[in-house]
Amino acid sequence: MRNTHRLPPPLLDIYEWQDQGLCRRMPGELFFDSEVARGAQRARREAAAKRVCMHCPVLTQCRQHALAAEDYGVWGGLTSSERAVLRQRGA
């Protein structure tokens, strides 16, 4: 019989928290950069996405995931630039 204690948990268990995210009810464009959005337009979009994140019941899980794996968009209330800074600091 195989020893299964070293196998990773099922993906559903790992990402199940995403089903509870408020972002699932919002347009994806709110959380991900447009190729042409710059300056004030981009800042407004990011601020709107962060407002959604701040009320999200899975903010902590999302932020942990984002710091570990996401390079684009607003995740866990952080922009890609903010995550990059936190990664450099070792957070």
Image (spheres, rainbow, N blue to C red):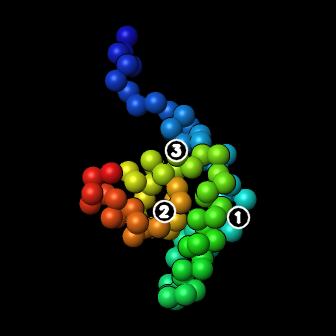
Q: CA distance from mark 1 to mark 3?
A: 18 Å
Q: Label 1's element?
A: loop
Mark 3 residue crowding within 10 angstroms, few (<14) / some (14–19) / many (20+): some
Residue under label 1, please give it.
Answer: 26
Circle on res. 61: 3
Q: Nearer the viewer, residue 49 or 72?
A: 49
Q: CA distance from mark 2 to mark 1?
A: 17 Å
**Label 1 is placed on what type of residue?**
Met
Q: Which marked residue is nearer to the observer: mark 2 or mark 1? A: 2
Q: Which of the 4 quarters of the picture holds residue 44?
A: bottom right
Q: Which of the 4 quarters of the picture holds residue 2?
A: top left
Task: Check contact, mark 2 vs mark 1: CB within 8 A.
Answer: no
Farthest residue, direction top: 1
Rendered location of residue 59, percent (x, y): 57, 49
Residue under label 2, please give it.
Answer: 78
Q: Label 3's element?
A: helix
